[in-house]
Image (cartoon, rainbow, N blue to C red):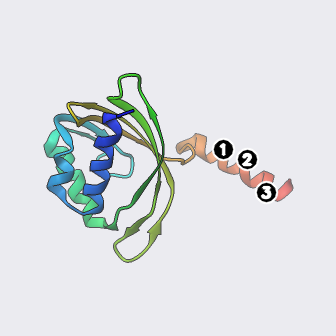
Amino acid sequence: MHIPAQAAMERLFKALEARDTQKTLDCFARDAFLFDPHYPKPDMRGHEEIRAGIEWGLSVMQRFHFTIVNVFAGRDGDSAAIEVDTSHVLKGGRELSFPQVFVVETRGGLVTRLQAYEPYGPNGIGGLFLGVERLKRRLFG
């Protein structure tokens, strides 16, 4: 089964891995929405903001690498949840490897919405209480 959302994401990953700003941007519709909590401005709308995000990402990352693990296609094929394993390297050599999920919507082969989900626990007060509970369990069983 041909899944346009998967093909769009494969192009996007290849462009990022090649460190090609324009090819990466060309994967997005002009009115696209991108949300990724790793970026200084996590919610990026339109080419101008997405370009700024791509440029920032390339400025701090020596290498991007994505391996697709699973694709859960929407009924239309133009949307999907894509599970990946990452193997990135920050400038300076620090390796970052973690699982990630992207929810993507496409139109005409271009990404119209892309939202990243990472396997991190809650932050703020909820994260504090969860951290204390985990510490108690480690210390006292």
Compared across the picture, whether 65 is left or right of 83 comes to left
Q: Residue furthest bottom?
A: 92
Instruction: Kindly identify the amino acid type of the residue bearing the numbered disc 2.
Output: Glu
**Is 15 located above or below residue 117 in the figure?**
below
Q: Kindly identify the residue that appears in the image at 21 percent across and 46 percent down.
A: 50
The residue that mark 3 highlights is: 138
In the image, residue 63 lies at what x, y percent? 34, 67
Q: Kindly identify the residue that appears in the image at 73 percent across and 55 percent down.
A: 135
Compared across the picture, whether 29 is left or right of 116 comes to left
Q: Residue furthest top?
A: 75
**Is 46 located above or below residue 74 in the figure?**
below
Question: Picture quarter containing residue 48?
Answer: top left
The dot on residue 129 is 1
The dot on residue 133 is 2
Compared across the picture, whether 76 is left or right of 47 comes to right
**Residue at disc 1, secondary structure:** helix
Quarter holding the N terminus?
Answer: top left
Q: Are marks 1 and 3 in contact (CB under 8 Å)?
A: no
Instruction: Kindly identify the amino acid type of the residue bearing the numbered disc 1.
Output: Phe
Question: Picture quarter containing residue 32?
Answer: top left
Closest to the camera, between mark 1 and mark 3, is 3
Q: In this view of the protein, which residue sits in the foreground, 86 or 55?
A: 86
Question: Picture quarter containing residue 93?
Answer: bottom left
Instruction: Kindly identify the amino acid type of the residue bearing the numbered disc 3.
Output: Arg
User: Of label 1 and label 3, which has the lower sequence position?
Assistant: 1
**Residue at disc 2, secondary structure:** helix
